[in-house]
Image (cartoon, rainbow, N blue to C red):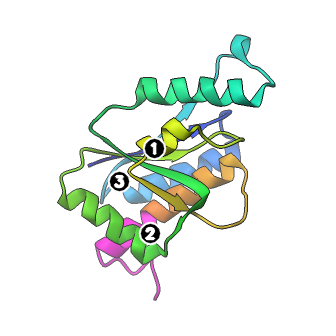
């Protein structure tokens, strides 16, 4: 199964990139993961929140395929434990999901169209985090999930 983290916004700072690469390298034996940063073309940038969300929707829908299983990460989503993340990922593998996409929306969230297209909506926390940090947290949680599924000692109960 392909696992992709999609995130709207700017490229990562170097220290975030290092952390993401670290967890991706540890996950490779189980399942490779990739990060896709979706950016609005600077010439189309706007301060109009509704227009910005619409532009982000267009970017997402252009890349999203019908076969993708989309999990939206949103502070209002369902809160899951690490073991529950692993269980959900296992269920995706069991149902032959080809590409699992974990979407980190834009600074103002995503449109209703994206929310409706999402197969699931998860919350990392009721706290709000910077997008770059969320990318790192998701990379770590994916590594933790695959560690749980493969009985690695990384996750302590």
Residue at the spot of label 3: 28
Local packing at callout 3 (Cα closer than 10 Å; few below 14, some 14-19, many 20+) is few
Q: Is 11 in front, or is 121?
A: 121
Q: Is residue 118 above or below residue 154?
A: above
Q: Marks 1/3: CA distance?
A: 31 Å
Q: Residue at x 55, y 51 (%)?
A: 20
Q: Marks 2/3: CA distance?
A: 12 Å
Residue 112 location (% of width, % of height): 55, 40
Q: Is residue 117 magenta?
A: no
- The magenta-colored residue range is 143-157
**Side of 65 relative to 126 (left or right):** left
Q: Is residue 4 above or below residue 78?
A: above
Q: Find numbered disc 2 in the image and state the secondary structure of the residue it sits on.
A: helix
| Label of residue 116 in the image | 1
Q: Marks 1/2: CA distance?
A: 28 Å
Q: Is 55 in front, or is 102?
A: 55
Badge nearest the viewer, 1 or 2: 1
Residue 147 visible at all? yes
Instruction: Tell me which label, 1 or 2, sits earlier in the chain.
Output: 1
Which image quarter: residue 89?
A: bottom left
Residue at the spot of label 2: 144
């Amino acid at each position: 199964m392909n696992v992709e983290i999609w995130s709207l916004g700017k490229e990562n700072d170097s220290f975030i990139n290092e952390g993401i690469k670290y967890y991706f390298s540890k996950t490779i034996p189980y399942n490779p993961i990739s990060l896709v940063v979706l950016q609005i073309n600077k010439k189309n940038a706007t301060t109009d929140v509704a227009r910005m969300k619409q532009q982000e929707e267009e970017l997402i829908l252009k890349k999203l395929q019908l076969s993708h299983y989309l999990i939206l990460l949103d502070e209002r989503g369902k809160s899951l434990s690490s073991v529950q993340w692993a269980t959900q990922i296992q269920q995706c593998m069991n149902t032959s999901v080809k590409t699992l996409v974990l979407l980190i929306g834009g600074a103002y969230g995503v449109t209703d169209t994206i929310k409706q297209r999402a197969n699931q909506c998860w919350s990392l926390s009721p706290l709000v985090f910077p997008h770059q940090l969320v990318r790192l947290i998701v990379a770590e949680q994916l590594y933790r999930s695959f560690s749980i599924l493969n009985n690695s000692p990384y996750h302590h109960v």
